[in-house]
Image (spheres, rainbow, N blue to C red):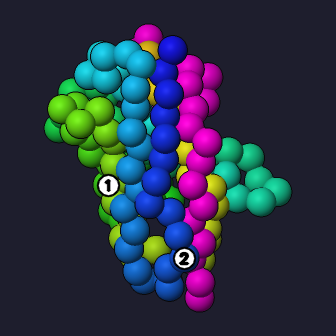
């Protein structure tokens, strides 16, 4: 069992930045990949990015956020981060972190992930 708790969401103006954090507990954090997804009202949950199980490991991003968002992890703190820069109104959504406990590397499919956080709201005003 893995518990995930996101934090850091809020209201920001377009062009601004936010950093989301996701604290994990319950299993050896360094043994599994992590991902970030988001869901806007009336839309399906969509992939934002993922990071392999190692600190400084390989990352993978959706085209819509590439060059603006950065995922990192600190395995000593059992935490994964999503740094979001140059935010746009279309980035407004509930953001979720997810754990792929059977995988050292994970991609864009929701089916690769076994545990999900409760989500944190990000609102970008124009």
Q: Nearer the viewer, residue 47 or 73?
A: 73
Who's the residue at 59% across and 84% down the image?
125
Q: Residue furthest bottom?
A: 126
Q: Which residues are magenta?
A: 102-126
- Can residue 91 be seen from the camera position used here? no
* As drawn, 28 above or below 121: above
11 displayed left or right of 24? right
The residue identified by callout 2 is: 11
Marks 2, 1: nearer the viewer = 2
Image quadrant assignment for residue 122: bottom right
* As drawn, 54 above or below 65: above
Magenta stretch contains residue 122: yes
Who's the residue at 54% across and 76% down the image?
11
| Sequence order check, earlier mark of 2 and 1 | 2
Please tell me how crowded label 2 is: few (under 14), some (14-19), or many (20+) other residues with Cα within 10 Å: some
Q: Residue furthest top?
A: 102
The residue identified by callout 1 is: 70
Q: Secondary structure at mark 1?
A: strand
Who's the residue at 35% across and 20% down the image?
32
* As drawn, 114 above or below 117: above
Q: Nearer the viewer, residue 70 or 19?
A: 19
> Residue 22 appears at what percent x and percent y?
41, 43
* As drawn, 125 above or below 121: below
Q: Secondary structure at mark 2?
A: strand
Who's the residue at 45% across and 37% down the image?
35
> Residue 52 appears at what percent x and percent y?
30, 29
Please tell me how crowded label 1 is: few (under 14), some (14-19), or many (20+) other residues with Cα within 10 Å: many
> Residue 58 appears at what percent x and percent y?
25, 35
Which quarter of the figure is the C terminus placed in? bottom right
21 displayed left or right of 30? right
Magenta stretch contains residue 87: no
> Residue 79 appears at what percent x and percent y?
32, 39
């Amino acid at each position: 069992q893995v518990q995930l708790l996101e934090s850091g969401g809020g209201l920001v103006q377009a062009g601004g930045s936010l950093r989301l954090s996701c604290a994990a507990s319950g299993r050896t954090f360094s043994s599994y990949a992590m991902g970030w997804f988001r869901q806007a009202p009336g839309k399906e949950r969509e992939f934002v990015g993922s990071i392999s199980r190692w600190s400084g490991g390989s990352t993978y991003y959706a085209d819509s956020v590439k060059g603006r968002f950065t995922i990192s992890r600190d395995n000593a703190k059992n935490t994964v981060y999503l740094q979001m820069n140059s935010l746009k109104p279309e980035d407004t959504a509930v953001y979720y972190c997810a754990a792929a406990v059977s995988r050292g590397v994970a991609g864009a499919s929701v089916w690769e992930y076994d545990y999900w956080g409760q989500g944190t709201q990000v609102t970008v005003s124009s």
